[in-house]
Amino acid sequence: MAKTVAIGVTGSIAVYKIVDLVSKLKKDDIEVVVMMTEGATKFVSPLTFKTISGREVLTDLWQESQEWKVQHIGIAEQIDFLLIAPATANFIAKMAHGIADDFLSTVVLANTAPCLIVPAMNSNMYKNSVVQDNIKKLIDYGYKFMDPDSGLLACGVIGQGRLPEIDDIYTQVNRLLFPKKDLLGKRLMVNAGTTCEDIDPVRFIANRGTGKMGYCIAQEAIARGAEVILVSGKSHLEPPAGVKFESVWGAEEMCRVMLDYQSSCDIIIGAAAVGDFRIVNIAEEKIKKMDGHSEKMILELAENPDILKTLGTMKRSHQIMVGFAAETQNVLENARIKLSKKNLDFIVANDVTAEGAGFACDTNIVTLIGRDGKIKSLPKMSKEDVAAAIIDRVVELIKS
Ligand code: C5P
């Protein structure tokens, strides 16, 4: 039976882009019900959405329904999926606090189908703690979010807040609407974020890893039915709902925690940016500056365990292990060396100097290199899509 997707459109300049999304979903024979807030109708006329979706656009809580049922309850019962895009700061706040004062917000409260929220707003608004707290609250309630893209915003500012590409929203809707459950019964452990090595009670050494790639893998694996353990170093991200979350600080602690789970896992993925060195003698008190009395401040470093290599030596025959190789030169060659040194099934290699790839970035450009010699170069993709491609490859290996 054809699926029905409801799209809640709220008042952002990005409203016009959603017309294209409605058209793409319609081409796939998906029924699309568009609901608009009053603000959204100031940017694009409901007539445009009515023409593209082939259905009445719902805007008014008090409009007369053709059917006997209260209309907002009827819609909530019919839909297989609810998308809120673009989602303004105001609408996110309403959702987080259960306010139901227009058609769309009443449908949101009555809805029981999966819901994806795609924020679009000015970058300072997006970063505002109130907005971020509302987003966290909704994630805890089980709502899914897509991070806004970074770039030039309608207000002329460069920052994070743009509506993601329509193709990426379309892919994400499809993924959630037709979820593959090909990891049911599997236990997957992924590490993420940066490890931190203490220098003294206030300072530490970390790196540019944000955790985004590993968190996307955890999210994808949960969606596909796996039991997921996310072992995370420092990251500003919210752990996806449903994961077993282990928060760690240094590389040695990360290694210890992963060793505890190692034997019970079917799949282990190393996406963390693990620091290769730690401080030999952590100062008990804050180190004082020398006021020019000394030329050098020397910190003695010791090598950290290579976590994947350690886990690789204990790899069980049914286990699949995946690593990352962030390189700045000779990408494929260096990645192949790591693949074999760490006893991995495949490695995800990327040139971190390429635009749109690597740390603190929403996209990545990667090549999957298999122990079996199979190489797959992927185009620039969102990290959510890279995570899906990695899990696809894992599933292929499990089946082979
Ligand atoms: O050797 P390199 O650090 O480039 O290898 C990267 C891969 O190895 C990543 O998957 C990373 O998570 C993992 N790694 C590790 N322990 C380390 C260093 C890297 O598990 N000490």
Image (tube, rainbow, N blue to C red):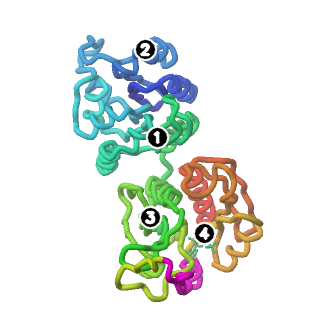
Q: Which residue is mark 4?
A: 323
> Where is 296 relative to 171, above or below?
below
Q: Residues within 10 Å of mark 1 (few under 14, many from 20)?
A: some
Q: Residues within 10 Å of mark 3 (few under 14, many from 20)?
A: few
> Mark 4 belongs to which amino acid?
Gly
Local SS, label 4: strand
Q: In which of the image's four quarters is ligand 1 placed?
A: bottom right
> Mark 3 belongs to which amino acid?
Gly
Q: Which residue is mark 1?
A: 177
Which residue is depicted at the point 30% across and 12% down? 66
Q: Report if residue 26 is visible in the image.
A: yes
Q: Which residue is mark 2?
A: 46
Q: Quadrant of residue 235?
A: bottom left
Mark 4 and mark 2: Cα distance apart in space: 48 Å
> Mark 1 belongs to which amino acid?
Leu
Front: mark 3 or 4: 4
Q: Which residue is mark 3?
A: 185
Which residue is depicted at the point 58% across and 60% down? 395
